[in-house]
Amino acid sequence: MLGLFIISALAGLLGASADLLLAPYVLSFDSAQTLGWITAAVGAGFLAGDAVMSVWRGAVARVRFFIACEMGVGLMSALIGWSDAAWLIGLAVFVYFLLISISDATIQTVWQTKVASNFHGRVFALRDMSAIGGIVLGLLVFAPMAERVVEPLLQANGAWANTLGRVVGTGPGRGLGFVFVAMGLLNVLVLLIGYAHPRICRLEHELPDVK
């Protein structure tokens, strides 16, 4: 359970940081109207995910399914940061939050069936702390780093223009774009490590449901 908690907490931390940076990222290269459409895609993604979970009983292998969904979230984060096309960012944002909604519901059932009820408060509080930690990290680390360090390096004449700039592009907003790509790929890496850990993937078979 500890291994699953660690990878889910890290995924939540990275995801919360990305959520916080979405608005300044879009506004760095597009209009407030575009941000409005992309924000609508956030709500639509959540709504679609909730609708899916309301009519579907969920995956049989819930831990593996959770990891797969969170990998998809990481890939969507990388796509959001890589692209500067509003329609593609909107589509990626929709899928991102759809998968977030589904993965949250999936992992919640794992905690509720595998963790004794007298520990629920502590476990859920720690999960919430990881999300809050992601917001703090985004505010204090990722946003200033993107603006003051990465953004100048990814300008047309910046030091990274001919290296990373060929992948994520150069110009306004590319620093935040790089942060989205980096956090997304780091998220995928963390989840791959979790997926490769046999005790995590076999948790549902090895650990009985609580009474």
Image: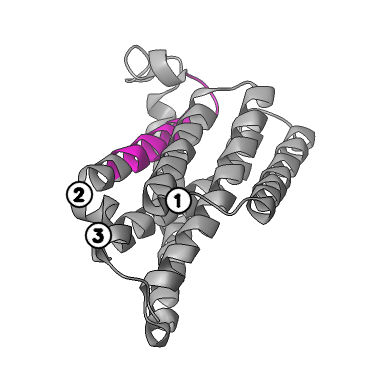
Of residue 158 and residue 96, the one placed in the foreground of this image is: 96
Of residue 57 and residue 174, the one placed in the foreground of this image is: 57
Q: Quadrant of residue 200?
A: bottom left
Q: Residues within 10 Å of mark 1 (few under 14, many from 20)?
A: few
Q: Amino acid at mark 1?
A: Val
In space, the residues marked 3 and 1 are separated at their CA atoms by 20 Å
> Residue visible at 67% across and 53% down?
50
In space, the residues marked 3 and 2 are separated at their CA atoms by 10 Å
Q: Secondary structure at mark 3?
A: helix
Q: Is residue 176 visible?
A: no
Q: Amino acid at mark 3?
A: Gly
Q: Relative to residue 65, is residue 107 depicted above or below? A: below
Question: In the image, is 160 to the left or to the right of 102?
Answer: left
| Start-end of magenta stretch | 170-190
The image position of residue 67, as x and y in percent, is: 38, 46
**Which numbered tag is attached to residue 3?**
3
> Residue visible at 63% across and 21% down?
85
Q: Residues within 10 Å of mark 3 (few under 14, many from 20)?
A: some
> Residue visible at 45% across and 53% down?
138
Circle 1 residue = 60
Q: Amino acid at mark 2?
A: Pro
The image position of residue 22, as x and y in percent, is: 58, 42
**Which numbered tag is attached to residue 198?**
2
Mark nearest the camera among 3 and 1 is 1
